[in-house]
């Protein structure tokens, strides 16, 4: 009896210790060689989903459950460091550059240095930088002093991106209609964030401006009636050319409480090939999917299909009430072998069809780096497979992981053609955003095949340009054709599209003119200018379980707001668009400026509970330094 009493007292003391020992620990992560701060370092509590990333100054902060834990610091190109914090609330660490499978170069930052002073492989670094082959340039230094930074680049980089031919200005007399499918993906933004946080400007074709803009949520009013989507427009001046106008089109999907969402039939399709072994791939996949499992309800069910050299049904369809069983199946996964992606997709669709829920949410969630090398592997083969399978009523969400061999083009194709969405997961924070914060938008379609068509009035508009959406353009006749699919919007999603407009009478280098047509009927000039319309905006959508679209349209009148009076969302979206044009070095960037867009974004952060807009400001500041560093390096040679 006495022994039992001691045991009870001991257990109570341990419970009390655990509840009171949760505390916040913070610090700075620096590069061991030169002491410079490292942004984008992953900091996590070993064996848990608790984690954070360092900001642009190398700072981190996170809550830990007890003193008896290990913090794991990891960053591409650096050796992983494991530290037990003990009782201190402040833990500063340095990371050592990894020498395995990497080579070192040096780049000169602030100041100037003669070419002959830089020897060996270093002399080639600026040339590589100009071609985007260097994986890191950190610009630091004061008082105009010369500052050198050691950079690590992988021996093999096989990342692939679909080539983007940027939209140009169109004359509404020749091209009165602009048609495109909506895009709610944010993968391009998180991917380029990964590049910049690792000290490198992203490849030009990795920058999809519409995905940058739509990474952020906007304060739009939802539909008031039984419609699933509401439309809003706003017109003001273009900040990079005040003589031009900027038209914003915003869509807002209806919010639905989680308990009222339909039952889900999910299939986790997980790439377990050898390329998924690094910490930022399969281990992060496991953590991400377990977060999603925690959101499931008893009426939901999950199956797990894995693929490497062969395909396996790792877990038959299991109710959401058996979370421990699902998580155990995820934890048991290991990586190795080649990548039979096509066969994996076929089995995932088969399993989803076998457990199909009528009027429910039937969806494959694919987690991969996209590196298929066995079976159907080309973008065209993937597209044909997805187009064939999507008619079953099973949608697909693609989660991209990893770096160095990321096949962005394949994953974007799968999501676009499979009535799904595409997110790039680079850290625990982004996993939480996709799997928890935006759970409904990621998994539950509220409107499918959403298309937008804008008709511009040539009496008011001399030329117009759609900013982004190059991969989502549609023929004008596809707008009314219900057999042509558009983009899907999930619960609570917002979509923003921006058009740059050159008003009639404004002289511009981008103005377009052709001789009057001889055989086509021309509208009288006074009929066009007397109209107060700048454009008519139409959008079509289908209910999730319908094959017939509905049409909604609004008119944008020629009443442009002064830019200072435009909404905070308008001003912030314009800053993101300008950032994208600078990253792409767009021929349409005109007077775009890092300094101006950063200042504008700071003033338009508005309500930013999750800190995503503040993070954008820091990202733009880092990109500005990287860009300046490249120019300095170029000038010194």
Image (tube, rainbow, N blue to C red):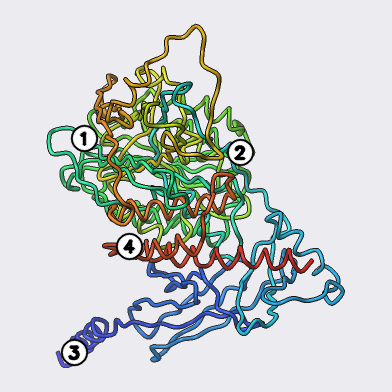
Q: Residue tagged by mark 2?
A: 163
- Which quadrant of the view contains residue 278? bottom right
The answer for how far apart the CA atoms under marks 1 and 3 are is 57 Å
Q: Regarding mark 2 in the picture, which secondary structure is present there?
A: loop
State which tag comes first along the sequence, 2 or 3.
3
Number of the front mark, 1 or 3: 1
State the quadrant of the N terminus: bottom left
State which tag comes first along the sequence, 4 or 3.
3
Horizontal arrangement in the rendering, residue 318 relative to residue 35 (left or right):
left
Q: Is residue 137 above or below residue 28?
A: above
The answer for how far apart the CA atoms under marks 1 and 4 are is 27 Å
The answer for how far apart the CA atoms under marks 4 and 3 are is 51 Å
Q: Is residue 324 above or below residue 547?
A: below
The answer for how far apart the CA atoms under marks 2 and 4 are is 32 Å
Q: Regarding mark 4 in the picture, which secondary structure is present there?
A: loop
- Residue beneath the point at 57% across and 73% down: 80
State which tag comes first along the sequence, 2 or 4.
2
- Which quadrant of the view contains residue 543? top left
State which tag comes first along the sequence, 1 or 3.
3
- Residue 302's mark? none
Q: Residue tagged by mark 4?
A: 605
Q: Mark 1 touching mark 4, by CB under 8 A? A: no
- Residue 9's mark? 3
């Amino acid at each position: 009896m006495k022994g039992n009493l001691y045991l009870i007292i001991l257990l109570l003391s341990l419970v009390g210790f655990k509840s009171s020992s949760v505390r916040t620990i913070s610090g700075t992560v620096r590069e061991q060689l030169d002491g410079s701060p490292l942004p984008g370092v992953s900091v996590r509590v070993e064996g848990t989903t608790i984690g954070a990333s360092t900001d642009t100054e190398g700072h981190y902060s996170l809550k830990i459950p007890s003193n008896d834990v290990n913090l794991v610091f990891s960053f591409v190109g650096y050796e992983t460091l494991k530290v037990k914090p003990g009782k201190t609330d402040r833990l500063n660490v340095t990371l050592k550059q990894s020498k395995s499978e990497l080579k070192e170069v040096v780049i000169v930052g602030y100041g100037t240095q003669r070419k002959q002073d830089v020897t060996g492989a270093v002399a080639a670094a600026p040339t590589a930088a100009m071609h985007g082959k260097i994986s890191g340039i950190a610009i630091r230094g004061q008082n105009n002093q010369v500052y050198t930074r050691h950079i690590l680049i992988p021996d093999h980089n096989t990342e692939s991106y679909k080539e983007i031919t940027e939209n140009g200005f169109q004359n509404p007399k020749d091209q009165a209609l602009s048609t495109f499918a909506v895009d709610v993906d944010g993968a391009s933004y998180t991917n380029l964030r990964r590049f910049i946080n690792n000290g490198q400007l992203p490849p030009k074709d990795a920058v999809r401006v519409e995905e940058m803009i739509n990474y952020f949520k906007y304060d739009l009013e939802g539909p008031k009636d039984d419609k699933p989507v509401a439309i809003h427009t706003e017109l003001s001046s273009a900040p990079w050319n005040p003589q031009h106008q900027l038209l914003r089109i915003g869509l807002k999907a209806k919010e639905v409480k989680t308990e009222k969402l339909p039952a889900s039939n999910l299939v986790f399709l997980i790439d377990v090939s050898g390329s998924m072994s690094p910490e930022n791939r399969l281990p992060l996949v496991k953590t991400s999917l377990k977060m999603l499992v925690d959101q499931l309800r008893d009426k939901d069910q999950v199956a797990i299909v894995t693929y490497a050299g062969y395909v396996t049904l790792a877990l038959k369809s299991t109710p959401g009430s058996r979370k421990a069983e699902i998580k155990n199946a995820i934890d048991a996964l290991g990586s190795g072998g080649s990548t039979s992606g096509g066969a994996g997709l076929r089995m995932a669709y088969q399993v989803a069809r076998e457990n199909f829920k009528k009027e429910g949410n039937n969806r494959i969630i694919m987690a991969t780096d996209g590196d298929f090398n066995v079976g159907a592997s080309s973008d065209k083969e993937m597209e044909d497979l997805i187009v064939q399978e999507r008619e079953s009523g099973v949608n697909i969400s693609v989660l991209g992981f990893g770096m160095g061999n990321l096949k962005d083009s394949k994953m974007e194709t799968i999501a676009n053609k499979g009535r799904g969405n595409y997110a790039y997961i680079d850290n625990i924070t982004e996993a939480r955003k996709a799997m928890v914060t935006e759970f409904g938008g990621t998994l539950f379609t509220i409107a499918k095949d959403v298309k937008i068509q804008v008709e511009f009035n040539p009496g008011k508009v001399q030329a117009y340009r759609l900013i982004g959406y190059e991969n989502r353009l549609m023929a004008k006749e596809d707008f009314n054709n219900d057999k042509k699919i558009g983009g899907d919007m999930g619960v609570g999603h917002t979509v923003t599209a921006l058009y740059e407009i050159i008003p009639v009478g404004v002289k511009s280098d981008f103005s377009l003119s052709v001789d009057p047509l001889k055989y086509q009927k021309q509208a009288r000039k006074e009929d066009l200018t007397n109209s107060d319309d700048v454009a008519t905006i139409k959008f079509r959508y289908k209910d999730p379980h319908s094959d017939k679209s509905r049409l909604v349209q609004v008119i944008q009148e020629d009443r442009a707001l002064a830019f200072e009076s435009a909404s905070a969302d308008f001003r912030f979206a314009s800053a993101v668009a300008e950032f994208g044009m600078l990253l792409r070095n767009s021929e349409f960037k005109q007077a775009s400026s890092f300094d101006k867009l950063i200042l504008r974004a700071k003033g338009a952060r508005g309500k930013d509970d999750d800190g995503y807009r503040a993070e954008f400001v820091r990202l733009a500041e880092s990109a500005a330094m990287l860009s300046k560093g490249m120019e300095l390096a170029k000038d010194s040679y």
